[in-house]
Amino acid sequence: MADSGSRSTFSLERFLSQDTALAEDEDEDELNEYESSTQDEEYLRILLDRERDRNHIRSPVDDWIKVARSEAIQWIINTRAFFRLRFHTAYLSVIYIDRFLSKGLITSDKNWAIRLLSVACLSLAAKMTELKAPALSDFPADEYNFESNTIHRMELLVSTTLDWRMHSITPFNFISCFIPCFCNESSNREFVSLTTQILLATTKDINFVGYRSSTIAMAATLMVIDQNLTKESLEMKLKSTWLNRFLDHGDVYNCYCLILELEPVKVTVSKADLATGLENLPAGTKRKRLAFNECEKKQLP
Amino acid sequence: MSNRGNSSGSGSNSNISSSNRPEWLQQYDLIGKIGEGTYGLVFLAKIKSNRSKSIAIKKFKQSKDGDGVSPTAIREIMLLREITHDNVVKLVNVHINHIDMSLYLAFDYAEHDLYEIIRHHRDKVSQAINPYTVKSILWQLLNGLNYLHSNWIMHRDLKPSNILVMGDGEEQGVVKIADFGLARIYQAPLKPLFDNGVVVTIWYRSPELLLGGKHYTSAVDMWAVGCIFAELLTLKPLFQGQEVKATPNPFQLDQLDKIFKVLGHPTVEKWPTLAHLPHWQTDQQHIQGHKYDSPGLYSVVHLSPKNPAYDLLSKMLEYFRMEPLPGRNALVPPQPGEKIVNYPTRPVDTNTDFEGTTSLQPTQQASGNVVSGGQHVMPTRNVPRPMHMAGMQRMQQQQQNMAAYGLASQAAMGGGGGAMNPGNIPMQRGVAAQQQQQQQQQQGTGKALKLSRDFTFEHLKSEKCKNKICCF
């Protein structure tokens, strides 16, 4: 992790020093999943082919939607921590939100609709990726309190609007391919953790909406390696790997520059709430074995 | 699915018609119930605007109150939306009943399945399935599976009742892989099969899973295909173990015992990862100490070890393999058969309506058709039988004669195993490479996929006519 913070204003440390609940609750399996290098070109091709659904995502233009989207994603980030869902799940739900919003079905100023959308999207994403998804009634309510039936209806509306194509590719699908190209095994864990934090932060920023998941994943990976890349040195880095021909250098660089401006996300859930969330974990969830106080004990380097 | 005529999404409740049926249902004539499983019910219906078209409608059981759309439904629909292949069942529509928010999947109907075909040969006609038919079925099954695997999809529940065969119509004789309720895209987390509360028969389960292995690979599907292949040859399940019914995840000793008795005692030399498999490691039931002789697979399937079919089968049923198999396993039985077999049509329970409740007056069907009485209840089965996603043809009065599922084999006459054979599964040496190059890129990536029990599918690429069972 060279050069952190020498010339650039970007500080990796900020991403390291996040709330432990956010940074440290990946369980072993998830880390192992990312660590097991998938250097399979054919697999990468399939991912690249499948991620095209993001091409059709348009950034919202209405200011109120931008604000509501940002709040909705903050809610997702909090709720992910609350239920200890995978980061991939949270990201997937954000893609659903953006794909849905692109259809322009929510037009007038309806914050509650955006919130309902985020509940439905997170629930759907959890059903796609988690071993056990939270019950609808367990989703934390703050200013809105939706009945399970309402969420169920929204799930159906989202699924049909997305044409039941729920297998969206997120940057998390790519990092198991990308990280091993730049990083040896010993520093892998910290690398994955930092990349994860950066990826999570990109969700709230509307400027990332138009980018492909592979581009964002590569930009985040390169950021962890070096925070002072120029367009040329970034290209050099890319060219040193077998991934080079699959990525657009210009896009990766633009995305990299956006990350330089990025603020880490904060989990705004109280620790008491997090503890409650853990108790409420569905039975049989692997993450159950990670008790909350274990998280607190572990400190990042 | 808006482009497919699905009217959902508007969230309207206006679809309560006079007959209290959702609007989408009006386009179908319900014939009856044809299947029932853990996930719900399957109905046979006809499209009103096109009476020749039969549709199987799978109704998902309502998820528990407050759980929303069931994860199984989401994953199954999502997978089916991703895949298009001649040898995979086709989802034609997704319907939502907005009143109770239940989900219905409409599939092209398939009249037959391998479970029934095997049963028919075993119990009704007491005659082996023609080797060319076996070959064609296997070829198509592998063709479909190759497509799935090259798209990183594992089926995880292959068994004869999930392998459908199309009846009368354009696609007559085409094999379709069905029931993706347990299928996964590789990266999705894999809940062990037994945690799902799902009855999955253990007969087609691979030894690594039986030994507690958690890493599902495409090899689990290939094992199942090997078991199905043997069953097509002998008309009996290859490894018919007694299932231990307990939760969670009981160790299926008898099933492993059945496997080891035929294939011999597994050793770490031949199967390096064996030592890491939980049930082998703990060895609570002392399987390690057992010393199984290996009578050999050929004693069970009655094939000469020199027969290419035997060669292929034994490779599908290897415990462990590092390298992909060369794509030139020939499966060429010695002589073509001549007898046409008419398979019966699927029984339809006409007493059940779309809600899955039994109606008091069996004659009051949506279609108003005269259907063959009420006596056609589902036959009792001695194995867990899941739903058929793809459906079946309406039951005709003249059922036996109508089906005309002529599994004859004139097409096979083109020369004892030459390129003209239908479903030239793995082809003969020499022929294979040549043909394969000509016919690449039919589906999937066109690249050889390291499938394991590591079978390369390169040689399976073939022209269209090979996709059907024999001569129609």
Image (cartoon, rainbow, N blue to C red):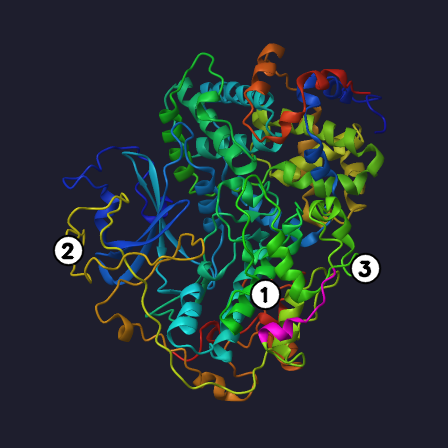
Amino acid, disc 2: Gly
Q: Is residue B300 magenta?
A: yes
Range of residues picked out in magenta: B291-301
Chain letter belonging to callout 3: B
Classify 10 Å Cα crowding around label 3: few (below 14), some (14-19), many (20 and above): few
User: Can the viewer see residue A168?
Assistant: yes
Which of B219 and A257 lies nearest the eye of the viewer? Answer: B219
Q: Which residue is mark 3?
A: B269
In the picture, which quadrant includes the C terminus of chain A?
A: top right
Q: Is residue B303 magenta?
A: no
User: Can the viewer see residue B206?
Assistant: no
Callouts 2 and 1 in the same chain = yes
Amino acid, disc 1: Gly
Please, is residue B351 above or below residue A4 in the view? below
Q: Secondary structure at mark 3?
A: loop
Q: Which residue is mark 1?
A: B226
Q: Taking A223 as reference, is B155 left or right?
A: left
Q: Identify the mark nearer the N-term, 3 or 1.
A: 1
Q: Taking B361 as reference, is A129 left or right?
A: right
Amino acid, disc 3: Glu
Q: Secondary structure at mark 1?
A: helix
Residue B8 picture location, percent across and down = 32, 39
| Marks 2,3: beta carbons within 8 A | no
Residue B118 picture location, percent across and down = 44, 69
Please, is residue B365 above or below residue A58 in the view? below
Mark number for residue B368? 2
Q: Secondary structure at mark 2?
A: loop
Q: CA distance from mark 2 to mark 1?
A: 44 Å
